[in-house]
Image: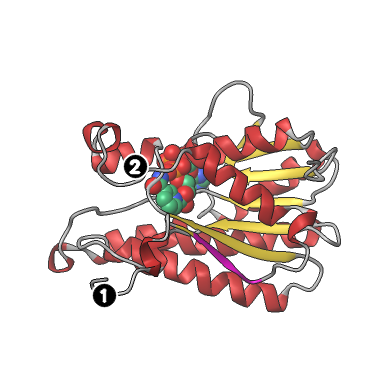
């Protein structure tokens, strides 16, 4: 099936690692032109502009550079994110920890939309990486859960405000990435007694929402969690 990305111009934040890198490669495999925006340099096969999404002037300059390299802009994918404290009780969570997570995961996405929207072609798309943590929680991750809930609300807010483009988000359960391995440990991922997504799984979800086959889908959060959140408390 032709996903409709031939010669489309795609910007992916967090494109140096994990889900963002998989998205960059998946768009390229579909014939798109891709530039990654990341605070770290990734593998050499991905054209990367260095910037921190929390630094508004630096982000604006990097977006201009990326759009010039791409020759326009059709799709923006916001994957840059951090997990912050994991397994830290609320009473031990500092305001600085909370502010750092919100700065990248919420303000970073908002600034990304602010500075890319003027460049986006009519019919374009923005896809944010939220998380299943917007809907379900494990103890000790309150800042991350709050940040991802905010991304879902931001998605709806922008979908109704930005009239030329669609805005959706993907909310995956645990994905095998450097972030997840750093947070949970290699053992927990390699011998998981819960389902773990591959980065390619999430990239396909992103490509669907970003492409013309999702033309009527706007303001939505695609919760991909193997159905865990659908289960009733009734023990049937
Ligand atoms: N891995 C999971 O289990 C999982 C599950 C659900 C959602 N997510 C979300 O998916 C997204 C990607 O996560 P991942 O697991 O691929 O992580 P990752 O750590 O492998 O990749 C994140 C990338 O974002 C970049 N980044 C971080 N802060 C940045 C900043 N301030 N400015 C620019 N770049 C920055 C990093 O350099 C890195 O390249 C995140 O938003 C994360 O919250 C991850």
Q: Is mark 2 within 8 Å of ligand 1?
A: yes
89 shown above or below 158:
above
Q: Name the residue at the front extreme.
A: 236
> Where's residue 35, x and y in %?
69, 37
Which residue does the image show at 61% across and 44% down from the upper left?
204
Badge 1: residue crowd in 10 Å (few <14, some 14–19, many ≥20): few
Residue 106 left/right relative to 27: left
- Where's ligand 1: which quadrant? top left
Q: Which residue is mark 1?
A: 233
Q: Give, as a single range, the part of the protein colored magenta.
A: 219-223
Does dot 1 land on a helix, a strand or a loop?
loop
Q: Which residue is mark 2?
A: 180
Give the total number of marks visible in the rendering.
Answer: 2
Could you say which quadrant of the image residue 4 lies in? top right
Q: Which residue is more in the foreground, 109 or 94?
A: 109
Residue that appears at 79% across and 33% down: 31
User: Magenta residues: mostly which secondary structure?
Assistant: strand
Mark 2 or mark 1: which comes first in sequence? 2
- Residue at left offset 50%, top offset 66%: 151
């Amino acid at each position: 099936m032709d996903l409709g990305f031939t010669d489309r111009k795609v910007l992916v934040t967090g494109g140096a690692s994990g889900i963002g890198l998989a998205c960059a490669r998946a768009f390229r495999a579909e014939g798109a032109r891709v530039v990654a925006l990341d605070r770290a340099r990734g593998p050499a096969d991905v054209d990367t502009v260095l910037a921190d999404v929390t630094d508004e002037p630096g982000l604006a300059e990097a977006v201009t550079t990326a759009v010039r390299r791409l020759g326009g802009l059709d799709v923006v994918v916001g994957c840059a994110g951090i997990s912050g404290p994991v397994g830290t009780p609320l009473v031990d969570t500092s305001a600085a920890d909370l502010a750092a997570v919100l700065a990248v995961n919420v303000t970073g996405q908002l600034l990304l939309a602010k500075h890319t929207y003027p460049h986006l072609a009519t019919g374009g798309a923005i896809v944010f990486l939220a998380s299943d943590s917007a809907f379900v929680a494990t103890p000790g991750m309150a800042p991350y859960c709050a940040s991802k809930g905010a991304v879902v609300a931001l998605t709806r807010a922008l979908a109704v405000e930005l009239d030329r483009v669609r805005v959706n988000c993907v909310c995956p359960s645990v994905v095998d990435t450097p972030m997840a391995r750093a947070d949970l440990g290699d053992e927990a991922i390699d011998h998981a007694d819960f389902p773990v997504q591959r980065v390619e799984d999430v990239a396909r979800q992103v490509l669907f929402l970003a492409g013309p086959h999702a033309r009527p889908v706007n303001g939505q959060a695609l919760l991909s969690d193997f159905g865990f959140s659908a289960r009733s408390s009734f023990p049937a």
